[in-house]
């Protein structure tokens, strides 16, 4: 039954209309079987596999069966539905950013496959509970959605934003040197601070804090978790240093980016698992 695991997003556009041998129709049945199996519709998938097998083993009389248009439309419909379902499964339903599941999978793959630098910025809204308490959760949801839009402005390809949980987000920055990653995080922090939040609710003000960590790629066990823990400790350093700041580590010392770098007291929060 290996045909059940056929590609979940088949491309049928290159098959001539009824100009190939039975293989064109066989392939369509196999693709339908794969798509249906991916949806758990095993009975229907089996029926299409049987149809494919019947075509393969039928007597060779030289007849080339035309591919029914209804069958082509069915493949196209299932392919679109499968693509949409996959996209929904990796997106956060509120903010439309990528979700934690996608983040975990991509970080592990990136660290295992690359030899260059991978930077991550863990971003957290400051005093977000007070926003919910004062303005209500509907406004709080709109704030989260707007923050994601601001975080994603000018993100270089193939960087992406993912919701880590609650009011925490992660900017994943592949092949980005540490200095540039800090600049990107600081620019995002500045956009959030400068945004006209009063247009959403009178008196509303929103800021974020962030911790930026980087890792050299390689097949390192627990590398993704280790890097997120580093970013988390730097995020707490930014929080403990007055919030509305981006913290990073340079030459073993915690530093703050942008205007926050002028602050006299900079906290150095170390998580035991890192060192």
Image (cartoon, rainbow, N blue to C red):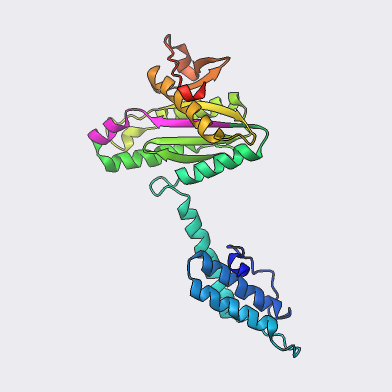
Q: Residue at x 29, y 32 (%)?
A: 129
Residue 106: where, in percent of width, then height?
Answer: 55, 43
Viewed as shown, does residue 112 lie left or right of 232? right
Viewed as shown, does residue 6 lie left or right of 81? right
- Is residue 125 magenta-colored? yes
Residue 131: where, in percent of width, then height?
Answer: 28, 33
Q: Which residues are magenta?
A: 119-134
Location of residue 177 with respect to 21 vertically, above or below: above
Residue 256: where, in percent of width, then height?
Answer: 48, 18
Q: Count the marks: how many?
A: 0
37 and 31: which is toward the camera: 37
- Is residue 142 magenta-colored? no
Instruction: Tell me if residue 205 can be seen.
Output: yes
The quarter holding residue 24 reads bottom right
Instruction: Tell me if residue 157 can be seen.
Output: no
Q: Residue at x 37, y 32 (%)?
A: 196
112 and 266: which is toward the camera: 112
Name the residue at the right extreme: 62
Name the residue at the bottom extreme: 61
Q: Residue at x 74, y 88 (%)?
A: 60
Identify the image quadrant of the N terminus: bottom right
Residue 157: where, in percent of width, then height?
Answer: 60, 40
Location of residue 235 with respect to 110 vertically, above or below: above
The quarter holding residue 190 reads top left
Q: Residue at x 64, y 83 (%)?
A: 54
Location of residue 98 with respect to 63 vertically, above or below: above
């Amino acid at each position: 039954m290996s045909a059940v695991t056929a590609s979940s997003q088949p491309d049928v556009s290159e098959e001539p209309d009824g100009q190939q041998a039975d293989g064109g129709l066989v392939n369509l049945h196999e693709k339908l079987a794969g798509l249906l199996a991916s949806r758990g519709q095993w009975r229907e998938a089996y029926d299409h596999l049987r149809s494919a097998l019947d075509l393969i083993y039928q007597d060779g009389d030289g007849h080339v069966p035309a591919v029914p248009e209804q069958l082509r439309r069915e493949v196209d419909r299932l392919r679109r539905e499968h693509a949409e379902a996959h996209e929904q499964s990796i997106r956060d339903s509120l903010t439309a950013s990528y979700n934690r599941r996608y983040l975990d999978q991509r970080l592990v793959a990136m660290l295992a496959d690359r030899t260059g630098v991978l930077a991550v910025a863990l971003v957290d809204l400051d005093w977000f509970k007070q926003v919910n308490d004062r303005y209500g959760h509907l406004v709080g949801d709109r704030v989260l959605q707007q923050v994601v839009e601001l975080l994603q402005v000018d993100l270089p390809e193939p960087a992406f934003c993912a919701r880590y949980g609650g009011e925490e987000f992660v900017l994943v920055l592949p092949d980005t040197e540490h200095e540039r990653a800090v600049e990107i995080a600081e620019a995002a922090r500045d956009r959030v601070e400068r945004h006209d939040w009063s247009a959403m609710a009178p008196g509303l003000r929103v800021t974020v804090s962030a911790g930026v960590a980087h890792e050299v790629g390689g097949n390192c066990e627990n590398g993704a978790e280790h890097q997120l823990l580093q970013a988390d400790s730097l995020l707490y350093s930014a929080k403990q240093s007055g919030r509305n700041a981006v913290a990073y580590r340079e030459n073993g010392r915690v530093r703050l980016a942008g205007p926050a770098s002028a602050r006299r007291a900079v906290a150095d929060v170390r998580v035991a698992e890192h060192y």
